[in-house]
Image (cartoon, rainbow, N blue to C red):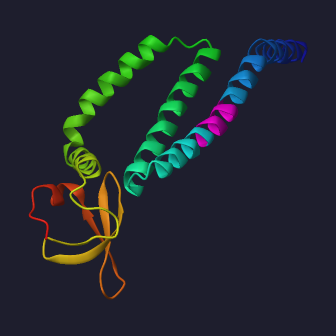
């Protein structure tokens, strides 16, 4: 019974030591993440308003807004990891290896994103245009990186992957 109490006391001491040593770091990382999330939302809104003031296309405006938010969140996440004492260099190297390996497996979906970027930047059509692609006619409702959303005369929504659009003749 005495040994069990000593083991329990050692475990409690270890838990309190860990809580004291790492509790403030965890709390600081959590505060950084929350503040960073709010800042990313604020910057995203700011970029969207700036794009609207410059009369940019809504699709391009949303793309720039989302890109700004993602960039800020990545930097905030890296800063938060640093608060835990995690070295970022091996993490980034491992991430690069994972991305390189997964590109072959994700070749189809990634081609959708590349095609979507080409559509957004090249602007062969914009939101509100009526187009015909792959024998489907509809009004462009939304252009995302992965797909384009059309609505037809009956009000049905049609989703077309962007890699199906890029090589086609658009009417």
x, y percentage for residue 75? 53, 25
Q: Residue at x 34, y 65 (%)?
A: 127
Is 134 situated above or below 42?
below
In the rendered image, the quadrant that contains the N terminus is top right
Please provide the residue range marked out in magenta: 33-41
Q: Is residue 29 left or right of residue 164?
A: right
Of the pair 142 and 109, the residue shown nearer to us: 142
Q: Is residue 22 left or right of residue 84?
A: right
Is 11 situated above or below 153?
above
Q: Locate residue 41: give its quadrant.
A: top right
x, y percentage for residue 36? 63, 32
Q: Is residue 137 magenta?
A: no
Return the residue found at the far bottom. 154
Of the pair 11 and 139, the residue shown nearer to us: 139
Q: Is residue 162 left or right of residue 93?
A: left
Of the pair 161 and 4, the residue shown nearer to us: 161
Q: Locate residue 2: give its quadrant.
A: top right
Q: Residue at x 43, y 43 (%)?
A: 64
């Amino acid at each position: 019974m005495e040994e069990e109490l000593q083991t329990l006391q050692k475990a409690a001491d270890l838990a309190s030591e860990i809580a004291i040593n790492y509790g403030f770091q965890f709390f600081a990382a959590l505060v950084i993440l929350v503040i960073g999330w709010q800042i990313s939302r604020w910057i995203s809104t700011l970029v969207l308003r700036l794009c609207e003031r410059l009369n940019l296309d809504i699709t391009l405006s949303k793309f720039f807004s989302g890109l700004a938010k993602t960039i800020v969140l990545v930097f905030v996440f890296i800063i938060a990891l640093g608060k835990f004492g995690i070295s970022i260099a091996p993490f980034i190297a491992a991430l690069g290896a994972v991305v390189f390996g997964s590109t072959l497996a994700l070749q189809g979906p990634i081609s959708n994103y590349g095609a979507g970027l080409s559509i957004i930047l090249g602007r062969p059509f914009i939101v509100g245009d009526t187009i015909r692609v792959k024998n489907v006619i509809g009004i462009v409702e939304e252009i995302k990186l992965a797909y384009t959303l059309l609505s037809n005369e009956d009000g049905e929504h049609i989703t077309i992957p962007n890699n199906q659009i890029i090589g086609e003749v658009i009417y």
